[in-house]
Amino acid sequence: MNPAGANNHSIPQGRPKRGPLPSMLKAYAQVLFSDSPAVGAILCVATFASPWVGAHGMLALLVSLAAGRIFGMSGTGLDSGALTFNAIFVGLGIGAMAEPGLASFGLVIPASIAALLLSAMLSLWLGSGHNLPSLTLPFLGIFYLVLALIPNLRSLDIMAPTYDAWLSGEWLPHSVAFVLKSLGAIFFLPRVDVGILVALALLIASRISFVLALLGALVAYPIALYVAQAPTTPLLSAMGFNVMLVAIGAGGIWFVPHRAGLLFAALASIVGAFITLGLFYFLEGYSIPVLILPFNITMLVLLQAMRSREKNSFPTAVEALPSSPELNLARSYSASVRFPDSLELRLQLPFMGRWTCTQGNDGEHTHKELWRHGLDFEVLGPEGSAFRNSGLSLEDYYCYRLPVTAAAEGTVALVVDGIEDNRPGEANQEQNWGNVVVVAHGPRLYSLYAHMARGSIKVRRGETVRRGATLGLCGSSGRSFVPHLHFQLQGTPEVGAPTLPLHFHDVIQVHDDHERYLARLLPNKGDVVRCPERDSALVSSLTFATEEPLSFRCSYQGKSLVEHVHSVLDLYGGLTLFSDFANASLPYENRTNAFVTWNPHGPTPSVVHLLAVALPRLPFESAAELRWSEQLFSPLLKSPVAAFFSDFIAPITGPQGLQVEYRITAATDNRVSVQGRSSKTLDGVTPVLQTELVLEPGKGIRSVSVIVNNRRFECVNQDLASQTTQTRKGA
């Protein structure tokens, strides 16, 4: 009977395809929270099961698109269908309820333009002002006016369509007919043939949404049939599609799909059913159809109520722009594994060069009870000794008077200086902490640097310091038998306050035969660690100019094509690589010490999907044999058939990640090669995933190749390849 609320907070798809057809199909797909043209095509065909209804909907779409271009609204809103799908359903509603003719088609024109304008206004007002989706509120606002107009306009009468036994599903079990007719009612066509097409489109758009829709139907059917006193056909239809859409929205679009999330979707469905019943009988007294009003009210109440929580726990709200349930789930798992503390203070090691942790948390000497989270660091020589010569002099110790640096940006809250350094083997038991700097990083979050050398502190109280700024020099003041640095986090600025848990970010862990980059690490006793040494040439290789697209010649299992990739800065300040091939996208970030990518979006394969698995993270250091590992959740890692069927149970099992080991090696012609191998194998020998990305420092990505499950994908930067060819010819 009316549209499902579309996801008008969907991920922007970059540079749109030319021509109106993709925008038109995406507008239809929005009703099922999708941006797939294939899904939109099926839904468009479904509306033409009744040619007059479909024609009115198509006219409304064309008028709203044309009006949007005339009004200068061209951009993501029109290209994605977010601003036009409401107009489609205004047209469908007029086609379903009014006698077809010139008058009904004439009414579509102003109504669809009004729906476009209201969509733009509500998207801006609710989205920017309240971070809420406008859903189908524009449709409801305009269509209720249309319903009031139709009986009062000349040559225009309300029509009550009827369907034969086959289309009404009398030959099907009542529960099955209920589901199919409810799906068809989304488009004002409560028919089983339309319901079958909508179910097919939903299955293609998202297997998780399909399961959630069935969950909603499982809740709605008994409530409509056994709770309502007189379960009429309009009530059954309204109950069905409203509650199914609530289940999809609460279980997978605005909240992360999860086995516990299924319970939340069921509870939200019960609330939606209660609101549907109340609104249906209330509006029936005024001869007003309930349409999709219950879905809008239920979802907006749920979204606003869940945002009042202090912590984003069960149900876990989608923190990025909502997308398909599958992508929301993969993002959530990827964030929890790869970026478990993305909102916390990022700490770097408080020194330069290689230092060894000589006492970790719960240490055997002083890191106990309220101070259990402290860390001690020293510098050890080639033979594992902390000093040269006899060690009887402070100057014999490798770490003595080396710089101590700020672990993060902040304001100096406290400075203690003037305490003498102890001779080796002696300790000041009265002034345990010695010379100290305390830096404030935020409410109840301070870092403390203790045992610094007398007179070496270079900052003053109230001074703002940057990450990596020198605070002073390592010493042996206070309770310090040998020179070392004590570091801790604490909740107050007092010297020696109880410690808080901590870990460092972007750490190089030094081993005998190689070095390993770790995105986060809590050093243990004996760990040799250092900060990455930023390679500016490597940084420039992964700094993409927004005005200069990259052209890649790609080969996907024998199929050759050219993809153009653009770097786009969105309204939220995020960076994204967009490929014009199937509108695939890859969010990324150039952090201080590493390049990182998140989950790709869009159909596979694409060069952005290859980059997501070949370059999920790259430390900006080209040290020989530097290694690191990542757990990936890319759709490229599964065959389409396996991915299709695994999606049905993904909320219960979670997405299956793949552990991949990466390393940097020097390639020919001064190039850098980043190679990845999965620990999981196909036959005990061949890795499930093998990747290689070749960088030309200072120039960019030269090539990327991926072999996954014996399927080979490869892309070569055409510009760099042609430059090499010209250089060789010149030589």
Image (tube, rainbow, N blue to C red):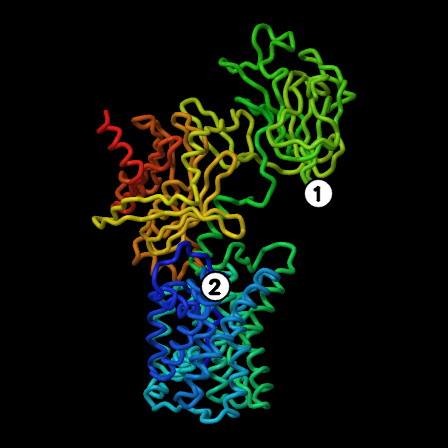
Q: What is the residue that sits farthest to the front in this orientation?
A: 70
According to the picture, the residue beneath numbered tag 2 turns out to be 72
- In the rendered image, residue 335, in percent from the top left (x then y), is placed at 49, 48
**Residue type, label 1:** Pro
Q: Are marks 1 and 2 in contact (CB under 8 Å)?
A: no
Disc 2, SS: loop
Quarter of the view holding residue 700? top left
Mark 2 residue crowding within 10 angstroms, few (<14) / some (14–19) / many (20+): few
Q: Is residue 616 above or below residue 277?
A: above
643 relative to 443 in the view: left or right? left
560 relative to 467 in the view: left or right? left
Q: Which is more toward the observer, 605 or 529?
A: 605
- The quadrant of the rendering that contains the C terminus is top left
**Residue type, label 2:** Gly
Q: Earlier in the sequence, mark 1 or mark 2?
A: 2
Residue drawn at 35 percent across, 28 percent down: 665
According to the picture, the residue beneath numbered tag 1 turns out to be 443
Residue drawn at 71 percent across, 31 percent down: 463
- In the rendered image, residue 656, in percent from the top left (x then y), is placed at 40, 51
Is label 1 or label 2 in front?
2
- In the rendered image, residue 444, in percent from the top left (x then y), is placed at 71, 41
Spatial distance from mark 1 to mark 2, Cα to Cα? 46 Å
Q: Which is more toward the observer, 696 or 217?
A: 696
Q: Is residue 618 above or below residue 97?
A: above
